Image (cartoon, grey):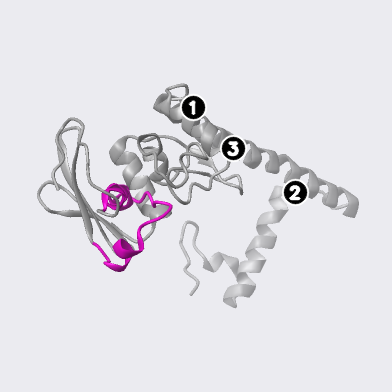
Amino acid sequence: MEFSPGATVLAAGNGFGKSALIKSLYDTFGADPHRIDESWRKAHAISAVDFEVASEAYTAMKIAGTYMVFDATGQKILQTTSVTRELSPFMADLLDFRLLMTDKREQVLIPPPAYAFAPFCIDQDKSWSEPWKPFHGMYLPNSAASLAEYHSGLKPNAYYVARAERDRLAVRTSGSASTASRVPRCTRANSFRATRNGNLFRPEGFRGRNEQSLGRVFGTSRPTEFPPGKTIRID
């Protein structure tokens, strides 16, 4: 079926498959509808949608639980059975959908494609009673508020791009500070043990003990058998 660039109206009586057709469009992109007619489900239909993004042509296809995307030349650029791990980030990049959300384990992630299409679908199963839930599996906490803020432009792409960069820098800074803070603690611990035992650390004596240890490892009593600068491999 072909759709015009403008609005397309589907007119038919009950049971002719209007809802099944619309739901299949979204389902092809990974937005799972709440309910599909039993007859349509038993038909094991294969769906394919030709679409354009920034004047670039693509084809999305769903066969059973497998999602595929092809470019304008017919080259397959994605094949996956995982919506969360693979289809979600792929569609987010393709559609420039930068919304980030937090799951119940407080892990930041890219929401499923259903979140990108949420404002464009009002179904007759849930949309009348629960706002921002036109698809099944919209499980992330505070979904309604996050969707309203993002799609209304209150918190657009730029907000989430900046937040992601802030979080990246915070993790990097935290890691550097943690590494730096461990050094003084180790130094103080070594100093404490040395002082308590009455044996102060002397660098000139450490080399001798190190050479003796090497001698025991390689079965030699003369550390000078190892020329300075020579690399010794232990298998």
Q: Find disc 3 in the rendering and name its residue.
A: 176
Closer to the N terminus: mark 2 or mark 1? Answer: 1
Expressed as whole percent of the image width and height from the top left, the position of residue 190 reads 78, 49
**Tag on residue 202?**
2
Residue 83: in sight, yes or no? yes
Within the magenta stretch, is there residue 68?
no
* Magenta segment: 17-45
**Tag on residue 58?**
none
Tell me: 183 left or right of 226.
Answer: right
Q: Amino acid at mark 2?
A: Arg
Q: Residue at x 35, y 59 (%)?
A: 37
Badges 2 and 1: C-beta atoms under 8 Å apart? no
Expressed as whole percent of the image width and height from the top left, the position of residue 213 reads 65, 67
Q: Nearer the viewer, residue 206 or 159?
A: 159
Distance between mark 3 and mark 2 Cα atoms: 30 Å
**Tag on residue 149?**
1
